[in-house]
Amino acid sequence: MTETEVFMQQVIYGLSNGMIIAMVALGYTMVYGIVELINFAHGDVFTLGGFLALTIVGALGAAAVLDPGTLGEGSHWLLLFGLVIGAGLFCGGLNVAIDRIVYKPLRRAPKLTQLVAAIGVSFILVNLALFWGGAPMEVFGGGNAAAASKDFPELLEGSNLLGEESNVVLRLEDLAIFIVTIPLMVGLTLFVKKTRLGRGMRATAQNPIAAKLMGIDTDRVIAATFMIGGFLGGAASVMWSVYNNTISFQMGFRAGMDAFTAAVLGGIGSLPGAMIGGVLIGLIRAMSDQYIETRWTNVVVFGVLILILVFRPSGLLGLKQREKV
Amino acid sequence: MTHSAQGAPLLSVEGLVAGYGSVEVLHEVSLEVREGEIVTLIGGNGAGKSTTLMCISGIVPVRGGEIRFAGERICSAEGGVRADRLVGRGLVQVPEGRRIFPRMTVLENLMMGAYGRDDRDGIARDLEQVYTLFDILRTRSGQLGGTLSGGEQQMLAIGRAILSKPRLLMMDEPSMGIAPLLVARIFEAVRELNRTGLTILLVEQNARAALKLAHRGYVLETGRVILADDASRLLVDPRVREAYLGEA
């Protein structure tokens, strides 16, 4: 492999992981934008999306899923999209339920109270994942211990998309990530710009009382925000599981940390900021893995975060200050 | 008490009690606005003027008394119509401090006023009315709301409210923090709006300007209405002159 090929390979890794991080980062940034809460449970909602996907795949049966012959041509893509939508709706619904049960009663409480509540929800969800990972997961190996990582079956198999001779490998999984995440991000951007509910979201984020005075049902807008943020996280969890072929009850912790960093890097509250921040964090991770050392990668990522916070606290695309009239 | 002979009561507030936490701000406030009137609510800082408007708009919960709008009870201690539904009925407020959306353009801000409306022709007509009333908004329609001057933001907030198709327009301190020349322009606009048949409830600290504009007025002091009369009489009332017009 030449130097350039090594670099290109890392760019592909970085972009694929970055798109997933960006999807999770959108969930943090949207919720923060509208209720000014860092939803620390978001990473764990992501985890449960992965567990749901594995449970569905398990219910369909190993043979049916792993043997392309049984399901027929193209069916693995259908299964993938089905999982994305299923896990997306599940995580969205879960996110809305968490807001309704835990965050909404605390809306006027001090910020610290809300933050601690979010961390509490995070612990509950992690343990739920631990419990979920116990019994029914033997199908694909991974052992009986609840805490062990579970193998996630390889849904998309195929040769190098850049050709057999190429040293740089572009897997079908890489392509799948772009096929799933790019339309979702474009769709989100159009939704927020063009639809009535999207305009209601922007208004509520900028001035909730004025939004109410415009006749906007802000409770509904907030619920929709949690739904969409959760949906994107759920979709990302399926792509993450398919990409890495493994899930664990802690997967949301790391993904969540990366995504939160990405959201802050891009400027928390900003949708394009979260997207760009996610891709940047993905690329930084890949380059650090290659050119520094894997075990230094977390140090590098958080070092970047600290530098940004010191020199540009509002992030790359963030506002100088939050306007409060 | 006499009043300029105008229509039936559009808004009536009866014995309104409200507050925040353990502090009671309004102690049985009663007032009435009839169809076609400009009514002003004057009083010093902390008298409860803004709280009164926020209760009427359904933002601050009511602890006692009731509010009726167009003959229907919209609010009492047992609950009431939700804030977002009141706008559709024509109860619209231009809030204190303007509360425009800083990261939306002037046009987007105006269209937020029409959030609940589907009548495209009506919206286009009202937009044109706003642009005629405040020409500067047309010029600046593509500019972000946060970049406007205070006076322009006030015009934007009023324009946005007009796009909500109000039957009653409540304005909270439209003159606050604005250059005197623009204050005159805004008060002139209020008069014009009233001439087209719009009913207006105006909260102001600038008592003289408000009383000159209004048909009737209420004086609020520490959460109680202490005077209610025709605006022209309040202007010459010795208590008002001393306390609110800076005259001995």
Image (spheres, coloured by chain):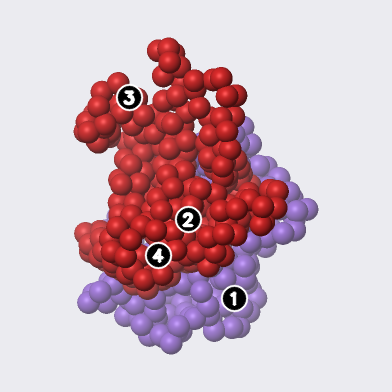
Q: Is residue B13 visible?
A: yes
Quadrant containing the N terminus of chain A in the rendered view: top left
How far is mark 3 from mark 4, CA to CA? 35 Å
Task: Tell me the shade of chain B.
Answer: purple
Position of residue B120 measured from the top left corner of the image (x, y, whole percent): 75, 53
Q: How much space separates mark 3 and mark 2, taking CA atoms? A: 29 Å
Q: Do dots 4 and 1 share one subunit? A: no
Q: Circle 3: is it few (<14), some (14-19), or many (20+) Cα within 10 Å?
A: some
Classify mark 4: residues with Cα within 10 Å, few (<14), some (14-19) or many (20+): some
Give how far across and how far down residue A81 sits, in percent.
60, 53
Q: Report, in whole angstroms, how far the alpha carbon at label 1 lies from the one at label 3.
A: 72 Å
Mark positioned earlier in the residue sequence (3 or 4): 4
User: For numbered disc 3, what is the local secondary structure?
Assistant: helix
Label annotation for residue A138? 4
Q: Chain of mark 2?
A: A
Check residue A244 in the rendering and tell me which mark sits there, or answer none: none
| Secondary structure under the numbered disc 1 in the rendered image | strand
Q: Which residue is tagged 2?
A: A234
Q: Nearer the viewer, residue B134 or A200?
A: A200
* Mark 1, residue position: B10
